Each structure stands twice: as C-alpha cells, then as structure tokens.
Amino acid sequence: MSGHSKWNNIKRKKEAADAKKGAIFTKIGREIAVAVREGGADPDSNRKLKDLIAKAKSNNMPNDNIQRSIQRAAGGQDGANFEEITYEGYGPSGTAILVRCLSDNRNRTAGDVRHLFDRRGGNLGTTGCVSFMFNARSRIYVVADEADEDQLMMDALEAGAEDVKNDGENEDGETIFEIDAAPDVFTELRDALEAASYQIIEAEVVQVPDTYVQVDEESRLKIESLIESLEDHDDVQAVYHNMDEAD
C-alpha cells in the first residue's frame, strides 16, 4: 500500500465537493431510503441505517434532511425503486475502476456509465473483471494527539481494528490517525471509538485495492477527469480505483 496520506486525499475530495453539497445530500438520501425499505426506520435495529446516518453527519448533512429522508422512505413517499449496481472497468494506463450506483433505471445508468468511460479514454468491462483486485475494508479517521497514539491503538485493537497508523496532519496541524479493520466490525468499532470520545472525521466501508498503479502525469489527469465525471453522475454513489495518488 502507498505510504502517502489517505486522509489528505479524502480532504481534497471533500473540499472539491463543498460546492456540490446538494447533490451529495441527495445521494446519501437515496442510500438512507434504500436502507429504510430493507430494514426499517429504527437505526437501533437497522445497522445499515445507523451507519448511513453517521455518514450523513460526517458530510455535514443537516439532521432535518436526514430525518426527512427516513420519514419519506418509511411512509412510502419516495416512489423511486432504487437498486444497487456495481460497474467495473478500466481507465487510462489500465487502471482498475469500480463504480457503485443506486439506479431506478438500469439501462439508463449502464449507458451513461459506458459513455463516460468511452469519452475519457477508458472502457467499461464485464462483471468480475477488476473487482477481484479490491477488498472491502472499514476505514475510520480520527483526530488525536500524538501522545495518545498508544492509547488509541489499544482502544481500537480491543474494539476489532487490525491496524492504526499516523496519517499526517490536517490544516489545523492536528494529527490524523487511520484505523483499518474488516468490514463486519465497522459499526462496533466506530461506536466504541465514539464512546471513548475520539473525534471521528470520516468513517466508511470502502473498497481498497490490493496494489496501486503508478501512472505518468498525462494519464493521471485523464484518470482524474474520468473519476470526477463519474462522481458527478446522479446515480453514482462511489468510485474506487487503484491509481497511486501519492503527491
């Protein structure tokens, strides 16, 4: 795995997305609606909904918006029937790309995703062509003093984490720690860290590549353009790739 700061990459993406918060809230609202339909409106008994509420809050989604999404789905007012679809493909220089979507029209979404790949030097592949290169992992980022690193490691490992590492500093000079764990302990691990009063700034189950691919600057710009165009699509919830993003 690359040694650069993953949090700095996440932070840059968050900053770039500030102007698109309405779209982000809409996408999270879709995920909440699907979770409510699948498991009910009570986050205490619906683990997926509980995780999504935490994700919404980490993206500064107002509580009113969160509750409205839950109530609309619980009351059957959100008429669209979304299904989760993952598309797989290749970007410039053979980079592997996974695109996770929520769509109410599979044919439309497939056509749009294929078009975006084609326009930006990539190509949409078949199911399974690159997914074997990725693994689901819990990734939680917390702010903590370096002096507390040993205690954080003890608390995180006791709650099910597999690794804790210093991931650099944020813009305020505070130390960020990346906590890595298997996906099935995500909720318990996040809850344990919250109960221990750690400041969580990002927490999500993500797809992590086994290895990263280094590319030249020209390819990097093309790949970033492809990723950005995919992320801007209304049906796309997340894009994962194996391009090395080291500065």
Image (cartoon, rainbow, N blue to C red):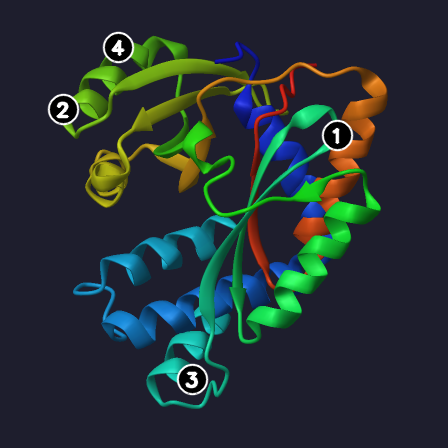
**Residue ID at (51%, 35%):** 130
Q: Earlier in the sequence, mark 1 or mark 2?
A: 1
- Does the rendering let one see residue 139? yes
171 horizontally vs 154: left or right: right
Q: Residues within 10 Å of mark 1 (few under 14, many from 20)?
A: many
Q: Which residue is mark 3?
A: 72
Query: Residue drawn at (65%, 21%), measured in percent from left and top?
Result: 245
Mark 3 vs mark 1, foreground winner is: 1
Image location (x, y in percent) of residue 116: 76, 52
Q: Are marks 1 and 4 in contact (CB under 8 Å)?
A: no
Q: Earlier in the sequence, mark 3 or mark 1?
A: 3
- Which sits earlier in the primary sequence, circle 4 or circle 2? 4
Cα separation, mark 3 vs mark 4, equals: 44 Å
Report the residue marked by disc 4: 150
The alpha-carbon separation of the residues under discs 4 and 2 comes to 12 Å
Amino acid of disc 2: Glu
State how far apart marks 2 and 3 are (Cα). Answer: 38 Å
Kind of residue indicated by mark 4: Asp
Q: Indicate the position of residue 15 as horizontal and vertical percent values.
A: 69, 41
Q: In this rendering, is residue 32 above or below 208?
A: below
Distance CA(mark 1)–CA(mark 2): 42 Å
Q: Which mark is residue 92?
A: 1
Query: Label 4 neighbourhood size at 10 Å, few (<14), some (14-19), many (20+)?
Result: few
Of 3 and 54, nearer the camera is 3
Of helix, strand and loop, which one carries label 4? helix
Q: Nearer the viewer, mark 1 or mark 2?
A: 1
Q: Determine which residue is flagged by label 2.
A: 158
Residue at disc 2, secondary structure? helix
Q: Nearer the viewer, mark 1 or mark 4?
A: 1
Q: Amino acid at mark 1?
A: Pro
- How far across and down, in percent of the image, does residue 232 sit? 71, 55
